[in-house]
Amino acid sequence: MKKIVGFIIVLATIMSMLAACDFVKDIFPASKSKLTFKASLSSKTNLSDTVLFTGNDIKWINGTTGEVLFADSMTISKVVKFHWIKCYLGNDSLFTATITVPTMSAVINDLVLDLNINDGHFYFEDGYPSYIDNLGTHSIRIQNKEKRAIAWSRFINELKEEGRYVEK
């Protein structure tokens, strides 16, 4: 009887230690994410929207740099095939971001999900290219950021609740 009780105590201790490990949380997330990201070839219609990934596919988003670290590196190759990504919290549409890659020559003055050429990671930014000298363009980006502030706040709060938000 003492052996069984001892075994149960040791097993319970090991299980609680494993539950605290990040790799276990990554493999077995505590709950299904409410965030869904749909990719589209058109910003105007939902007809071609397909679920590209969910919040469960995001390991974390850095609130300081905007960096998105995906749990699976293959997600990056899926994302670059589209022009826009739409973020939903449940059934609520939060925002649309333009997907940008280093070879683009366009200027975009609203939210982008930018593939960085130096590290191969995606970053949420307020426009593309990130460096811009035109004062008028800078004020347009600030106005667009203010328009999506409530939706962005809901997005960040959900990431925090799911444990997918960091500041480094």
Image (cartoon, rainbow, N blue to C red):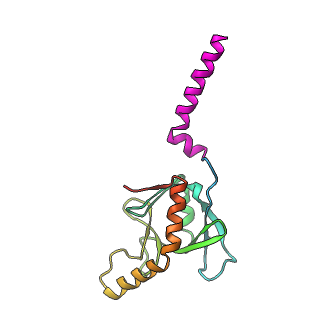
Return the x and y of residue 45 as percentages of the image width and height: 65, 81
**Residue 98 seen from this side:** no
Q: Which residues are magenta?
A: 1-29
Return the x and y of residue 147 as percentages of the image width and height: 48, 80
Residue placed farthest to the bottom in the image?
136
Q: Does 105 appear above or below 121?
A: below
Could you say which quadrant of the image residue 145 lies in?
bottom left
Count of labels in the image:
0
In the foreground, 84 or 117: 84
- Residue occupying image coordinates x 59% and y 44%: 27
In the foreground, 65 or 70: 65
- Magenta segment, prevailing SS (helix, strand or loop): helix
- Residue occupying image coordinates x 60% and y 24%: 11
Q: Does 6 appear above or below 50?
A: above
Q: Is residue 25 magenta?
A: yes
- Residue occupying image coordinates x 39% and y 59%: 119
Q: Is residue 121 magenta?
A: no
Return the x and y of residue 159 as percentages of the image width and height: 52, 59
In the rendered image, the quadrant that contains the N terminus is top right
For residue 142, side relative to residue 54 (left or right) = left
In the rendered image, the quadrant that contains the C terminus is bottom left
For residue 38, side relative to residue 105 (left or right) = right
- Residue occupying image coordinates x 59% and y 27%: 12
Residue placed farthest to the right in the image?
47
Could you say which quadrant of the image residue 57 lies in?
bottom right
**Residue 124 seen from this side:** yes
Return the x and y of residue 165 as percentages of the image width and height: 47, 56
Could you say which quadrant of the image residue 13 lies in?
top right
